[in-house]
Image (spheres, rainbow, N blue to C red):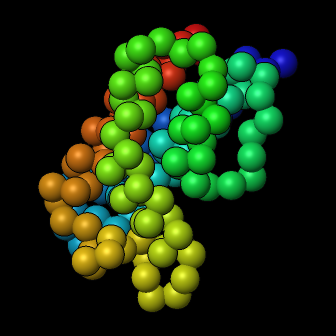
Amino acid sequence: MSREIAIEWLKAANDDLMLIESILDKEELTYLAAFHSQQSVEKSMKAILEFYDKDVPKKHDLLLLKKLIGKLPINEELCAIMENEDILDALNSIYIDARYPGALGLLPNGKPDMKDVRQFYEFANKLWQRVKTLIT
């Protein structure tokens, strides 16, 4: 049962990636691309927890999810991706800030630029690819 639910999490994460791909070159939509990067990373991480039949918290803190995943027997490549706490922290702030009117997924210094968005997307995509390999 856990594998099937993990696959559903992974599909949802891929939906976010596909949306990002459709807007990645639109500078006026960087805040949306950044927000969906956070969503994809969160869903990929929750897929890992589900795959290992662990409780999936109804929380959106990527650093908390990383800590929970750190207790699991995952491969080094997957661990290495999630070691980038700077990106996880930046994505956390995007999600939290986007929950309030007017913030719309902004970084502490304002709207994410194209470089930020590409970095977030590449991180989310790389994580998704590795989780897909683990689960399928």
46 vs 119: above or below: above
Residue occupying image coordinates x 46% and y 52%: 38
Residue occupying image coordinates x 63% and y 25%: 71
103 vs 12: above or below: below
Of residues 81 and 8, the one nearer the viewer is 81
Q: Quadrant of the C terminus?
A: top right
Of residues 23 and 103, the one nearer the viewer is 103
Of residues 135 and 26, the one nearer the viewer is 135
16 vs 70: above or below: below
In the picture, residue 128 is in which quadrant? top left
- Any part of residue 95 in sight: yes
Q: Position of residue 113 (x, y in %)?
A: 19, 65
Q: Is residue 104 left or right of residue 4?
A: left
Q: Is residue 136 left or right of residue 17?
A: right
Q: Position of residue 58 (x, y in %)?
A: 74, 52
Q: Residue furthest right?
A: 1
Q: Quadrant of the N terminus?
A: top right
Q: Is residue 48 left or right of residue 55?
A: left
Residue occupying image coordinates x 60% and y 13%: 73
- Any part of residue 11 in sight: no
Residue occupying image coordinates x 39% and y 39%: 124
Count of numbered circles in the view = 0
Q: Position of residue 5 (x, y in %)?
A: 75, 28
Q: Residue furthest left?
A: 115
Q: Position of residue 88 (x, y in %)?
A: 41, 49
In the picture, residue 30 is in which quadrant? bottom left
